[in-house]
């Protein structure tokens, strides 16, 4: 039986950045083993729906650490190695090939898997979901021959994939059940801006619609909507959410209502067992509620935080939820949690691709969106949310006033 001081179960971004942080904190050769069901070393996930999907990034170019780097630091990486059972009390893992691993400290970083459509024709070729490098590779290959595509869902995956496909001169249709683009995150005005931007670039948007099934012989050639309309397509990509991968821990006592439940140090109820990334349900000390975040920045921060905790820097996790997106020639960022906002304030002109939107709860900033804005605004977003800063909505909305003055008494 192999034994390691640290074992990371999962090979995503939390694993890659946790390994990097441990190495920077004096990890000794032989102390860390990464066990991953994936066939690739830990890699950056954002390019999968952006640069890698577009063909601008290479497989080696999106690796978090090179193969040589793991060897140089004496880190064992077990790829294509699914784990079939876990005994947290005995601190052991058993793989599908009957290998056993013992650990002192375990980081559960099993991530999440895409939710699948349960419709007729769902198993036809060229019906895709995007989660892994292999998924992105297959979508990119199909796009080389496709003339018409359907992107299902209006979150950041659906929007980014639709933008990449449209830029490849593929006639792309976005289909989603809500009445406007990314209603859960965007204000009506932000949704309207992006819908116009997509339409101006040839993307057809079908709101208040759902895919009822796919048609084709062997491979998809059409998607049928719930209203009866049929859309011709050579490929379809669905981004309709993900679910945390927790089956191994169903009887372990560490699961909550949504994911593996951890405290502010990322510890589970089992001694020496932690969780990070998409699978971790953690207490958000800024917004004073539990949450599970499915974005790369959270996985990076929590992987790094775990490495610090297990090497003696025992501090509670304090992290502002964050994500960014690149679509067409635009880049935008979002910080915080807009739930409970009582008003929004806009800086800039929303008819142009340079504006920011600020969500306030009373006078406190709780969320911010910024696209093509000054660094001062981006910095203020993080600081104000983390510090629970009160601002003057009137001063905040004055485009020509330095943003820092909005927080001055």
Image (cartoon, grey):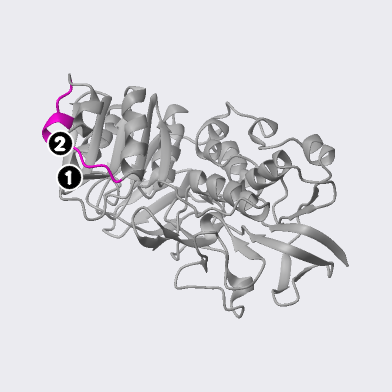
At 38% from the left and 40% from the top, the residue drawn is: 159
Helix, strand or loop for disc 1? loop
Q: Which residue is mark 2?
A: 392
Helix, strand or loop for disc 2? loop
Observer-nearest of 200 and 327: 327
| Residue count near mark 1 (Cα–Cα under 10 Å), binned few <14, some 14–19, many ≥20 | some
Q: Position of residue 402 (x, y in %)?
A: 23, 22
Q: Does residue 372 appear anywhere in the picture? A: no
Q: Main secondary structure of the magenta part?
A: loop
Q: Does residue 118 appear anywhere in the picture? A: yes
Q: Which residue is mark 1?
A: 363
- The quadrant of the rendering that contains the C terminus is top left
Count of numbered tags? 2
Labels 1 and 2 touching (C-beta < 8 A): yes
Observer-nearest of 141 and 186: 186
Quadrant in the rendering for residue 345? top left
Region in magenta: 388-399
Q: Position of residue 220 (x, y in %)?
A: 50, 51
- The quadrant of the rendering that contains the N terminus is bottom right
Asked whether, in this view, residue 136 is left or right of residue 234, the answer is right
Q: Position of residue 185 (x, y in %)?
A: 30, 47
Q: Position of residue 162 (x, y in %)?
A: 41, 38
Quadrant in the rendering for residue 65? top right
Looking at marks 1 and 2 on the same chain, the residue that comes earlier in the sequence is marked by: 1
């Amino acid at each position: 039986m192999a034994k390691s001081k640290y074992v990371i179960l999962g090979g995503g971004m939390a694993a890659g950045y946790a390994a990097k942080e441990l190495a920077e904190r004096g990890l000794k050769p032989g102390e860390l083993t990464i066990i991953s069901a994936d066939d690739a070393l830990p890699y950056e996930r954002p390019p999968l729906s952006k640069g890698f999907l577009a063909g601008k990034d290479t497989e080696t170019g999106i690796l978090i650490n090179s193969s040589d780097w793991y060897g140089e630091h004496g880190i064992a990486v077990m790829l294509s190695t699914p784990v079939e059972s876990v005994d947290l009390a005995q601190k052991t893992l058993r793989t599908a090939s009957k290998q056993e691993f013992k650990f002192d400290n375990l980081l559960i970083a099993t991530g999440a898997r895409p939710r699948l459509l349960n419709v007729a024709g769902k198993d036809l070729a060229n019906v895709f979901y995007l989660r892994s490098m292999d998924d992105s590779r297959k979508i990119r290959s199909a796009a080389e021959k496709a003339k018409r595509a359907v992107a299902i869902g209006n979150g950041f995956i659906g929007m980014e994939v639709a933008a990449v496909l449209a830029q490849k001169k593929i006639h792309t249709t976005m289909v989603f059940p809500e009445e406007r683009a990314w209603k859960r995150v965007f204000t009506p005005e932000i949704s309207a801006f992006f819908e116009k931007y997509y339409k101006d670039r040839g993307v057809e948007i079908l709101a208040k619609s759902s895919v009822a099934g796919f048609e084709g012989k062997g491979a998809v050639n059409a998607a049928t909507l719930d209203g009866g309309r049929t859309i011709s397509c050579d490929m379809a990509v669905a981004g309709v959410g993900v679910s945390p991968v927790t089956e191994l821990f169903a009887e372990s006592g560490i699961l909550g209502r949504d994911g593996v439940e951890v405290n502010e140090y990322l510890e589970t109820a089992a001694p020496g067992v932690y969780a990070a990334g998409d699978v971790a349900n953690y207490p958000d000390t800024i917004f004073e509620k539990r949450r599970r975040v499915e974005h790369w920045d959270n996985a990076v921060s929590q992987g790094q935080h775990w490495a610090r905790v297990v090497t003696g820097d025992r501090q509670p996790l304090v992290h502002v939820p964050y994500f960014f997106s690149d679509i067409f020639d635009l880049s935008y960022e979002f910080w915080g949690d807009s739930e409970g906002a009582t008003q929004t304030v806009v800086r800039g002109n929303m008819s142009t691709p340079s504006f920011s939107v600020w969500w306030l709860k009373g006078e406190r900033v709780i969320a911010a969106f910024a696209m093509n804005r000054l660094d001062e605004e981006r910095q203020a977003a993080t600081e104000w949310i983390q510090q629970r800063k009160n601002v003057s909505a009137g001063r905040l909305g004055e485009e020509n006033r330095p943003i820092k003055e909005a927080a001055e008494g």
